[in-house]
Amino acid sequence: MLNQLIHFDQEMFLVINQGLSNPFFDWLLPILRNPYTWAPLYLFLIIFFIKNYGKMGILIVAFTLANFGLSDAVSSHLIKKNVKRIRPCNDLVFKNEVNIRVRCGSGFSFTSSHATNHFAMAFFWIMLFRRRWKHALWLCVTWASLISFSQIYVGVHYPIDVVCGALLGILIGVGVGYLFKRFFPSFYTNTPSTSPTA
């Protein structure tokens, strides 16, 4: 059963990594999965949260950072170091079939920390803002999904690494969102019409 799952995972990887190859993706997807690409967005959000929500905005930033730290610790340190799955681009048997589009890295593959971290942030923000911003859900999910998908396309993760990382990130993001709601319920009781971003 496990061998069948691994074989299916490798086949799906090749469908994405090779079958979808095109010059536009070759240019775009390595950019999307680069953390420096999103630095201006993160800076904007920090300023936006604090400017519009004051002390509550500082708490949102603090919880976002804690959420990221928790997701990265669970994925990168707890799971990866125990599962020890080799990345497709480092697998001595499989890597000859891989189109490697970025530096492979020496870390393990399961789970994808890119997927875990970005879905954790996405769903934490969804928990906070889905009633205030009608586009929050699809924007956050699309953003996290594109970054996660790019991990497969560039050759550094298998699909199961990404799917499981995304599910883990969703659980963490929703969990941190519930904690925020429990400690700061007043943020949720404000209606969109009375919020600073209405």
Image (cartoon, rainbow, N blue to C red):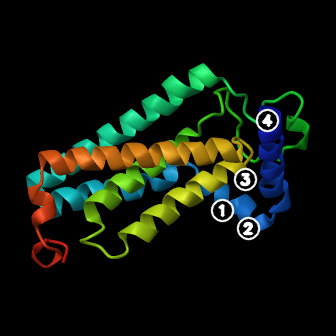
Q: Amino acid at mark 4?
A: Met
**Local crowd size for mark 4, using a 10 Å CA cut-off: few (<14), some (14–19), many (≥20):** few
Determine whether the residue tagged by mark 1 lies in a helix, strand or loop: helix
Q: What is the quadrant of residue 15 in the picture?
A: bottom right
Q: CA distance from mark 4 to mark 3?
A: 26 Å
Which residue bears the numbered disc 2? 24
Nearer the camera: disc 4 or disc 2? 4
Q: What is the quadrant of residue 122 in the picture?
A: bottom left
Q: Amino acid at mark 2?
A: Phe
Q: Earlier in the sequence, mark 4 or mark 3?
A: 4
**Residue 80: % across, % down:** 58, 27
Q: CA distance from mark 2 to mark 3?
A: 12 Å
Does the residue at mark 1 contact the one at mark 3 (Cβ under 8 Å)? no
Which residue bears the numbered disc 3? 153
**22 on left or right of 61:** right
Task: Identify the mark at residue 10; answer none if there is no mark.
Answer: none
Q: CA distance from mark 4 to mark 2?
A: 37 Å
Does the residue at mark 2 contact the one at mark 1 (Cβ under 8 Å)? yes
Task: Identify the mark at residue 1; answer none if there is no mark.
Answer: 4
